[in-house]
Image: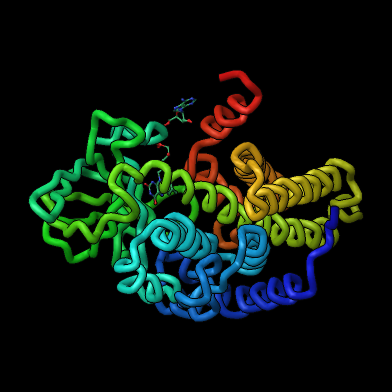
């Protein structure tokens, strides 16, 4: 067993962190204050390779495995204060680019993959529906054969990147009676007649990441839009969630580290009753707990990535990592606010941001309750 990062991993992570601090965070405060997504900032992140980390170099990606990807995304979260941007980049990369690469046909690769890896087009993944959240198999969106085309009809909600996406990875029922094996994925262009998007409005945290509702009214798409085989959508989605639950949450480990450093500074700078507030164990214990959460999160995260990269059973490890990191991020967000006192709840300081950005992390990519269900199954309880 070896807990050291290689020189290459350390150097690349430092490079990405510096880029995130100097470029992505530079205008972050203004973007976040206005809840604004900025395509020019996206372009700069993409130029840095942050839209195609796990994709093969042949297609313009970096060819990283899961563990290397986690290390880079962690550095991104450590350096970039705008977690909405990080979230949008990760949703594009893990829930969209990965399945197109791992399951898409040569035709789809030739047509789209380079532009997807390079972030020249933005993709949104759409599976959730008003009546199908945790239970995705209850989806009602259908794709019915019409000669050598499919007709897609339905409604998808809470779709990250939908208002800015050029392409949509839509999951639909092709054989409703077949349950798990009745779902298929389709890659559809935004200008497909019958496809409309509405903005879903403000959400708790991650406010520079746009999301929306996608309506499909008899969208006619060619058979070549199918990603993978007909009926192969559910396993493909599960595989993309392994990447998202694993790698996206690395950003929260980085964010927790950034906020810990801010909190340590506050604990030493701020004086009350004639001494640093950090001299009180009530404060230093919070800092110790924040540190403990980062270290335990990182161990679970890297182990999950290592298992995936070494073709070892990883499902339980990924669920443990996702569950623990999201719950830790919420708790550390609360601790940071408490350490900062009044300034912690002043919107202008942005100390409340970790908490706000962490709250949705217990819901997306499978809720905390669903992760517990997966872990309980591995304990033999289901
Ligand atoms: C910020 C954000 C971004 C998102 N982006 C996307 C996206 O890009 N694409 C997309 O398709 N979707 C996206 N989603 C949707 C997300 O995947 C769903 O919100 C999530 O799967 C939960 O579904 P739901 O909201 O319908 O809640 P529900 O499934 O209705 O759950 C409500 C509550 O019941 C609990 N519950 C449900 N079933 C069980 C069970 N069997 N056992 C125990 N508890 C249970 C849940 O854990 C939760 O606490 C996003 C969500 C958020 C918050």
Residue 344 versus residue 181 in the image, above or below: below
Q: Residue 343, percent across and down?
A: 66, 55
Q: Residue 244, percent across and down?
A: 52, 52
Q: Residue 243, percent across and down?
A: 53, 53
Which of the 4 image quadrants contains residue 129?
Answer: top left
Identify the image quadrant of the C terminus.
top right
Q: How is the image coloured?
A: rainbow
Q: Residue 255, percent across and down?
A: 65, 58
Depth order, front residue of 323/359: 323
Depth order, front residue of 188/78: 188
Question: In the current view of this chain or complex, which residue is farthest to the top?
Answer: 381
Residue drawn 88% across and 50% down? 273
Horizontal placement of 81 versus 232: left or right?
Answer: right
Residue drawn 20% across and 57% down? 223
Residue 375 versus residue 112 in the image, above or below: above
Residue 317 versus residue 51 in the image, above or below: above
Quarter holding ligand 1: top left
Horizontal placement of 183 versus 376: left or right?
Answer: left
Depth order, front residue of 117/260: 117
Marks counted in the figure total: 0
Q: Is residue 99 visible from the viewing direction of this image?
A: yes
Q: Is residue 356 visible from the viewing direction of this image?
A: no
Residue drawn 30% across and 73% down? 111
Question: In the current view of this chain or complex, which residue is farthest to the left?
Answer: 147
Residue drawn 16% across and 58% down? 221
Horizontal placement of 160 versus 222: left or right?
Answer: right
């Amino acid at each position: 067993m070896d807990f050291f990062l290689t020189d290459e991993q350390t150097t690349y992570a430092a490079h990405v962190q510096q880029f995130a601090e100097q470029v992505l965070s530079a205008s972050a405060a203004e973007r976040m204050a206005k809840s604004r997504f900025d395509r020019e900032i996206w372009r700069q992140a993409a130029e840095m390779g942050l839209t195609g980390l796990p994709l093969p170099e042949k297609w313009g990606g970096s060819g990283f495995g899961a563990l290397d990807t986690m290390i880079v995304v962690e550095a991104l979260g450590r350096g970039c204060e705008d977690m909405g941007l990080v979230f949008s980049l990760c949703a594009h990369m893990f829930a969209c680019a990965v399945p197109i690469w791992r399951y898409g046909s040569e035709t789809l690769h030739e047509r789209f993959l380079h532009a997807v890896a390079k972030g020249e087009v933005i993709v949104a993944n759409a599976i959730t529906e008003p009546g199908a959240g945790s239970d995705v198999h209850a989806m009602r969106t259908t794709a019915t054969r019409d000669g050598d085309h499919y007709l897609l009809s339905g409604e998808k909600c809470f779709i990250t990147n939908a208002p800015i996406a050029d392409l949509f990875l839509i999951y639909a029922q092709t054989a409703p009676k077949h349950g798990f094996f009745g779902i298929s994925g389709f890659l559809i262009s935004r200008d497909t007649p019958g496809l409309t998007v509405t903005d879903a409005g403000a959400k708790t945290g991650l406010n520079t990441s746009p999301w929306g509702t996608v309506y499909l009214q008899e969208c006619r798409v060619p058979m070549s839009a199918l990603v993978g085989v007909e009926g192969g959508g559910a396993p493909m989605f599960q595989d993309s969630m392994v990447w998202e639950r694993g790698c996206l949450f690395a950003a929260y480990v980085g964010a927790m580290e950034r906020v810990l450093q801010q909190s340590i500074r506050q604990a030493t700078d701020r004086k009350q009753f004639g001494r640093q507030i950090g001299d009180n164990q009530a404060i230093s214990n919070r800092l110790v707990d924040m540190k403990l959460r980062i270290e335990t999160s990182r161990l679970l995260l890297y182990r999950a990535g290592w298992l995936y990269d070494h073709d070892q059973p990883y499902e339980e490890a990924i669920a443990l990592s996702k569950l623990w990191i999201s719950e830790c991020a919420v708790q550390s967000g609360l601790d940071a606010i408490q350490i900062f006192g009044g300034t912690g709840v002043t919107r202008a300081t942005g100390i409340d941001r970790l908490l706000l950005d962490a709250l949705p992390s217990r819901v997306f990519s499978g809720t905390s309750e669903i992760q517990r269900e997966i872990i309980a199954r591995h304990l033999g309880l289901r």
